[in-house]
Every structure is written in structure tokens, then in C-alpha cells.
Image (cartoon, helix red, strand yellow):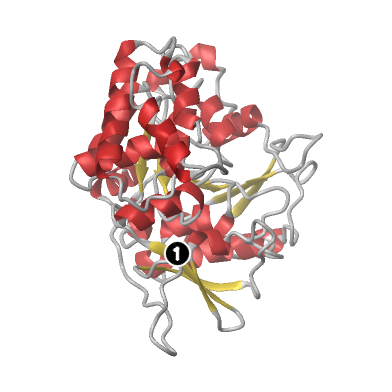
Amino acid sequence: MPEYPPATEFLPALGPRVVFFTGGTALRCLSRTIIKYTHNTVHLVTPFDSGGSSAALRLAFDMPAVGDVRNRLLALADAAVVPQVVLDICNGRLPVAGERATLLQKLYALASSKDPAWAGVPRVFGEVLRLHLRYFLENMPDNFDPREASVGNLILAGGYLHYRAQLGPVLSLMSRLLRVRGAVLPIVSDSLHLAAELEDGSVVVGQHRITGRGGVRLSAPVRRLFLTAQRPGDVPAAGDDPVPCTSCVTPLAATYLRAADCICYPMGSFYTSVTANLLPEGVGRAVADAVCSKVYIPNSGLDPEQGTLSVADRVRVLLETLRRDAGENVPASRLLQTVLLDSVHGVYTGGIDAEGIKAQGVAIRDCPLVEAEDPRRHDAELTARALLEYAHPQ
């Protein structure tokens, strides 16, 4: 397979459409790098986060999580047009400590153009951001907890509320404002949560409880991941487990998948960022219908969610999840064709099990991808160029 040409040899505006199933921060560096080659990447993001700033917003408004959407919008913003101070405001957070009244005072001050934070911000950016922050403040419940609130999340929440509980219009507006080089949208529009049935029979509700971060590990490996309307902290009836529910992939996300030049299951939290995106109804069928390459880039380094799963085990989980919707007899060639890994510098917890991967009908490409000095990090430039070799416009 020929190497992908240098970025200077073609126009990124005409670059291929690579669709990523993604969630948190693992793809941030790759997102910033790949826009040198194409402005047509599509980031289908999980809106199921249930921790941090997202938790307070979801409790207040029963809305999809917007933190990962914000993260990706800012990563794809055109730095040649959008001043760094604008990105800093959208990435800013309130302190984790302090009196509630004092923190709210900071928020109300930020909604005014006189606040020092807006010094140097061009009016076209400042007016839109402050307007949406004011939308949020007008609808904020009396018991809202502002501690460690993400300013960008509050701005997106304000737009969501203003546009009658729809994320699409505010995401479209923010994408234009930030000159986003690509498309960012949630995989579903419903406000749902992740739940995991573990091998010991217990059930955990809430994305933040499945990640295994913060020192809180799962009591057993994940047996099954599903979506539920039950919120973390809700107490079900005695003896009842959370009820799985169905949710359809958004029509726009399905259209992007079917028209993709390459579909990528990238590095990131295996269950809560990648596999979670495959749960909605219609995702598996849309992937199977897409006539393009489908590539998996497994994590290098520790991912608490995946435990001791080998790369072959993770391929099995991805295929099983996709086949729940696409059909159990759909061949791997229509769902996942290639695993892209680096056996020299990469560290794959649980091992690779190359024979196990090939036995599932999936090929392996072993090439430089991971930073030699830090096996937890993929080299964004190497990864972008390797992935784009599989992106051929149809």
C-alpha cells in the first residue's frame, strides 16, 4: 500500500472523510494533527459521560453530556483564525473549592463584556459566547453546583436550552464560530447512561464508575455493556437491575458512516469511549453498509477499563457489539478489516495474540505508531499518516 502523500501535496479541504468513534481526550492530539491532511474528519462522540462538570449539568437538565463534544470542537478549531484566548475561555473551569455564592458571582461577571477575561477577544466571538452563557444562567436551577464547572460546557448547555433541548443547532453554530476543521456530533440525541454487567453478576451504572479511574476499580471484568435511562445514584426497586433501553443513531451520524472513506475505532477508553458508540441501534448496519476500510487502533499502555483483555479479545468485543445490530452472520470484512499496532514501542496489556486476531478474519499491520520515550502515547504524526493510507475516496 503506497504511503499517504505529504500534507503540502494536496488541499486538506478536499481530503478524505475519516469517521472516528470517539469519546474523551485520547484522540485530541491526533485530531489536531490530522487537520493538516484533511478537513473532513467526522467525530462521532459518546454523550454518556456522568462525571465531573457533565454530572451537574445532566442532573440539572436531564441532557446529554457535552464535555467530550466541547473537547473535540476545540481540538479541531482553526488556530489561524480563532484566537487562543477564545479557546482558553472555552477550556476554562471554575475552582473546585470556594463558596457557592462566590463561584456564581464569577459566572455572572463572566457573562458581562466588562469582565477582564474578555480582554483581547474579538467581538464576533465574545458576543456569541456570552449570549449562550447568559442563556444558561437564565435557566440555571437554584441548587446548581458550580464547583469545577467547565465554561465551555455551560455555553453549550445554554445553547441546548435555548434551542428547545436540541444539541444540533448550537453545535452547528459553534462549529462555524470556531471554524472547526471537520464535523463533531453525538452518536445519539437522547439523554442516556452507560451500564455494565460484570462477570460476577453485578451491574454498574454510570460512565464514571466504569472507567476504573480515580482508584475505583471494577469488582470484575465487563461481561456486557448497555444503555439505560436510569441515572447513576437512582435507586431501583428492590432486586431490580437497570432496564436496558434502545436508542437510534442520529440520521446524520448514520449518513456520515455510510459515506465514509475510512472508519476508525481509535485509541481511547475501550468501553466508555469506543465500544459505547457502537451500542445505538443502526450503528452496526451503517458500518456494514459502508464501502470503505475499517481500522482499529488499540490502546498502548494501561487502560483500566479493558483489564487484561488482549488485542484479540478487544477485536472480539468490537465485532460482537457491531453484530448485535448488523446481524450475527455479517463477516468481519464488512465491520473491521485491519488492526493497526506497533509491536516495537507499543505496550499492549494482555498481549496481542496475533493468531487470535487473524482467526477472526482481521488483518494486522505492524508499523511505527507509538512514542519511543512514552509507550502510553501514540505519535500523532505517525498515526495520522498510517491511518490515512487506508482512506481512499470512493
Vertical order, 101 against 29 (above or below) = below
> Could you tell me which residue is drawn at 68 percent across and 32 percent down?
379
**Three-letter amino acid code at the position of disc 1:** Leu
162 displayed left or right of 99: left
120 displayed left or right of 251: right
x then y, percent, for residue 392: 44, 33
227 and 253: which one is in front?
Answer: 227
Number of numbered discs: 1
Vertical order, 220 against 193 (above or below) = below
Vertical order, 365 against 83 (above or below) = below
Q: Residue 174 sits in which quadrant?
A: top left
**Residue 261 visible from this viewpoint:** no
> Could you tell me which residue is drawn at 72 percent across and 53 percent down?
302
Q: Quadrant of the C terminus?
A: top left
x then y, percent, for residue 318: 52, 61
x then y, percent, for residue 9: 51, 13
> Could you tell me which residue is drawn at 68 percent across and 64 percent down?
307
Q: Quadrant of the N terminus?
A: top right
Q: Residue furthest left?
A: 164
Q: Which residue is mark 1?
A: 194
**Residue 321 visible from this viewpoint:** yes
84 displayed left or right of 185: right
- Mark 1 Cα shell of 10 Å, populated few (<14), some (14-19), many (≥20): many
Please tell me whether mark 1 sits on a helix, a strand or a loop.
strand
Q: Residue furthest bottom?
A: 239
x then y, percent, for residue 64: 35, 52
170 and 269: which one is in front?
Answer: 170
> Could you tell me which residue is drawn at 22 percent across and 48 percent down?
165
Q: Residue 185 sits in which quadrant?
A: top left
117 and 90: which one is in front?
Answer: 117
